[in-house]
Image (cartoon, rainbow, N blue to C red):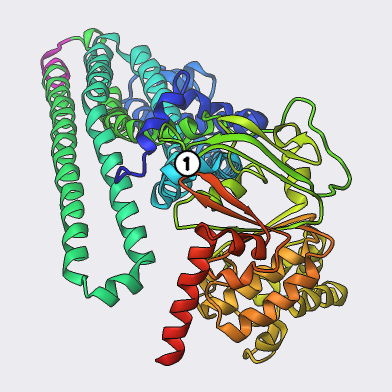
Amino acid sequence: MADDGGFEGVRENVDGNPILKLVGYAKPYWLRLSVGVLAAFLTRFARLVPPIIVAAAIDRVILNSGEPGLLTAAGLLPAGAITGEAAKLAFLRRLVVIAAVAYLVRSATRFASRYLLQSSAQKIQRDLRNDTYDHLQHLSMDFFANHQTGGMMSILNSDINRLESFLNTEFRQVIRVVATVGGIAAVLTWYSPTLALIALAPVPIIGLASALFLQWIEPRYRGIRRTVSRLNTRLENNLSGVPVIKAFDRYDYENGRVTEQSQTYHDEKVAALRIRRAFFATLRLLTGVVFVVILYVAGTDFITAADSNRMLAGGGVFALFFLYLRRLYSPMRRVGKSANKYQLAKSSAERVFGLLGRDPAITDPEEPDTPEDIDGAVDFEDVTFGYGDGEPVLENVSLAVPAGATVGLAGATGAGKSTLLKLVPRFHDVNSGAVRVDGVDVREYGLQSLRDDIAVVEQNPYLFSGTVAENIAYGDRDVLDGEAAGEEGARERVREAARSAQAHEFVGDLPDGYDTEIGERGIKLSGGQRQRVAIARALLNDPAVIIFDEATSDVDTETERAIQASIERLVEDRTAFVIAHRLSTIQDADTIVVMEDGGIVERGSHDELLGAGGEYADLWAAQADEQAVSADD
């Protein structure tokens, strides 16, 4: 399995530009986004007013220029020369009012734009994470076998958070660039086309340079994403495997592996950082050159022009240009950073939408069969199955199990016992042949209808972080909802299931009984306790078919006998499949099936198989010898 969890391959499932797919998630919020965009533009336009006020004050009041200026042309200031103290004070009051209104508009629209755009980004993030998680849950078991948890967590957290940050920050930066550059270009051109041409000359250069930078840096960021995924997977594996690391004292070994991958990530990030810093420094140099050119050209013209009407710019306009230059190039330099953020977001979007573009291998048929009840008859007909492109694990397996029968499965590890039973709830689909429940191919059932009547208790059951009661209640939707609501009826059903699984007594001895927190994966419980909780969870669902995959392997002999006695009562009206390492667990089964190398080599009752003197008899004798040796010890 690849160290990156195999997630680089999901990029192939992306059709078109993934960023456009991200934008598609904004459609439900188009109204609030439209208002937010409009408010953002008004904010930027309001920021352009104070320098125009400064230019008007210099030209009309200080230099007594008769040039009307932009505010005069807009009808906000009087025309003509401003002479006399009273006229100048009146002019000043108008400037103050215009400035106050501009700042008021700026404050109100800034709040509106940031709130609407940022809250929309949060909503899009929520929707995208929910859809991705839901889609991930519906993918086949093959997918989870070939992709590691660290990679999945990287997509659900790091990648989706990066997309939210991109929408939240860079979308506003695009508005900033368009509004600021467009507004300043219009104002500067109105005042002095010549100086505006000089000031705006770097704009297309910066845009072209940013586009080239995007193309050049893209493969490097893809490499960084692969490295991050590998590092996350390594850290997740090591944290989950702490008991093994401690048991074998492999601290130095694991530290070396993490250090090596961490160093690779460091080197790639530093290399990318060096490229970015050089690019941004070049942009700053370019804008500095323009500043110097305008300073020289406009300054020379201002000093040497004999006729002020022939000047490229008056004193106020000259000041206006320099006030605007900083505001003009600041967002333009930000284009380079936005290009960098865009590439990171695109890489994340490829993984997210690549995952969303992967079709589940196991889906409902177009017209699913959804019976209210399932009797539990199970038939395997010439079943052949292999994982992915590997060799078949099962070949031409046929087995008919009537409703209500108990079937024990025996055989060496790797014989195909667990794989065969995973086909019943349709965790996988057969390569050839068919698996039928009540005479209906499982591929014709609705998945929920099928799985509602099939319960599985595995050798190493997974328990969620939470209370004992919550984990048992997980077996039934109504009970789970009732437990969450604190209903006593739901708790009583939990207790009944626990009693059936021989779990009630040990749960009563826990510090908080059924409300005891059991930790991640049930780490606070012993192996036998975890299995009994899992059995209770399965029984709560009242399934027609129940599968015990070595469910008593981690319990002591006395507990196993108690659970076995309980199971015998519980499976009387159910179809039961019991995979057992200890053959004593299945000796009373209606039929015992012995598997070897993906096929059935023997079947019959316990007595019949012992009498046949075949594989089962050998296994029984070997276990009897082991028990005798243990007793002697």
Viewed as shown, does residue 234 lie left or right of 251?
right
Q: Quadrant of the C terminus?
A: bottom left
**Residue assigned mark 1:** 393
In the image shown, does 162 or 607 lie closer to the viewer? 607
**Image quarter of residue 510:** bottom right
* Overall secondary structure of the magenta section: helix
In the image shown, does 540 or 629 lie closer to the viewer? 629
Residue that appears at 55% across and 30% down: 431
Question: Taking 311 as reference, is 293 above or below it?
Answer: below
Viewed as shown, does residue 376 lie left or right of 77?
right
Crowding at label 1, few (<14), some or many (≥20) Cα neighbours within 10 Å? some
- Assess whether residue 106 is covered by the magenta stretch: no
Q: Is residue 369 visible?
A: yes
Residue that appears at 39% across and 47% down: 151
Residue that appears at 27% across and 18% down: 203
Disc 1 marks a residue whose amino acid type is Val
Viewed as shown, does residue 184 lie left or right of 545?
left
Q: Position of residue 422 (x, y in %)?
A: 60, 47
Q: Position of residue 494 (x, y in %)?
A: 77, 74
**Image quarter of residue 174:** top left
Question: Taking 463 as reference, is 389 above or below it?
Answer: above
Q: Position of residue 27 (x, y in %)?
A: 63, 27
In the image shown, does 113 or 470 lie closer to the viewer? 470
Q: Tell me the magenta residue range.
A: 298-306
**Image quarter of residue 585:** bottom right
- Assess whether residue 301 is covered by the magenta stretch: yes
Question: Taking 594 as reference, is 147 above or below it?
Answer: above
Q: Position of residue 276 (x, y in %)?
A: 19, 35
In the image shown, does 533 or 272 lie closer to the viewer? 533
